[in-house]
Image (spheres, rainbow, N blue to C red):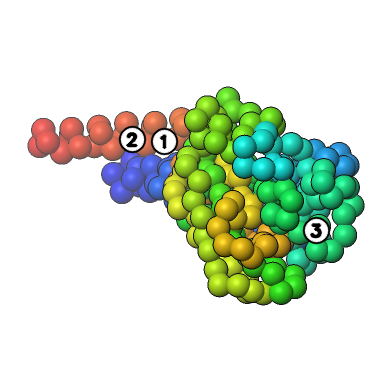
Amino acid sequence: MKAHHLLSLATLALGTLGIGSAASITNFDLGSGGTNVGSGFGNVRTWTNVQGTGITITATAFSASSVGTGLVASQLGQYSGLGLGVCNPGEGTGCGDPNHQVDNSGYYDFVLFTFSAPVSALSFVADPYGNYDSDATYYTRNGNSGYTILGKTLAQLVSTQGFNSPLNDDISCCGNTNTVPVTGSGITSILFGTRVGGDSHVDYFKIHTLSATTTPGQVGDVPEPATFGLLGASLLGIGLMRRRSQKR
């Protein structure tokens, strides 16, 4: 087989493996679709193969009654065309407007997003429905195993659970949509919520959409053995062709 044919096969195999390529999730509407498991506090919503990228996104809600108290399970609400909101224990399940938004009135509300493979260039759109502020605080993590959210304080997420230090994104009050670009790459988990501390304005918003870029080589299903065989045979053939050329 000629070298350029072998090179084409190797390129095909690499593409099948997902090496050297990335896929984009663009303005994914969190206010629709997905599968919800459970009701009340601690329910979980999951979206699979988001926009054909092979990525699964899972969302759950947590809240803290103060900065120094442990996070508790909250209710994750989905509102058609609007996004995700949170009802915390202080508000009760099925809470009404405006408390069904992600807010920092009484409790600090957060949504934990986990991704089945690392993502970069992550961003969220936080949209206040009403004349409210939409400042945000978030904690990112690289790696999905070996951590606990429930019962941990926000400080303990960083000191004992492997989360990165919190970052804040502030926007002028009030009623303005806030597009929050998340700092960091290779993110597999992010706890995203309203501003912890900050100004005197109360934050209320729904998490409307997210965008991200998948990390090359870590997207989708594990390739079949035949794919690895094709790659190996192609690379071996290229090597043999080069050796023959050198002997001439």
Amino acid type, label 3: Asn
Q: Label 1 belongs to which residue?
A: 231
Q: Nearer the viewer, residue 94 or 155?
A: 155
Q: Please determine whether, in this image, residue 50 is positioned above or below residue 38.
A: below
Tell me the element at label 2: helix
Farthest residue, direction top: 146
Near mark 3 (Cα within 10 A), the count class, few <14, some 14-19 or many ≥20, is: many
Amino acid type, label 1: Leu
Cα gap from disc 1 to disc 2, whole angstroms: 6 Å
The circle on residue 99 is 3
Residue 78, percent from left and from top = 80, 56
Cα gap from disc 3 to disc 1, whole angstroms: 54 Å
**What is the quadrant of the C terminus in the image?**
top left
- Which badge, 3 or 2, comes first in the chain's sequence? 3
Q: Residue at x 43, y 43 (%)?
A: 19
Residue 48, percent from left and from top = 70, 46
Q: Residue at x 86, y 39 (%)?
A: 38
Left or right of 95? Residue 107 is left
Left or right of 20? Residue 34 is right
Mark 1–mark 2 CB contact (< 8 Å)? yes
Q: Quadrant of residue 115?
A: top right
Residue 166, percent from left and from top = 50, 46
Q: Label 2 belongs to which residue?
A: 235
Tell me the element at label 3: loop
Q: How many marks?
A: 3
Q: Residue at x 28, y 44 (%)?
A: 3
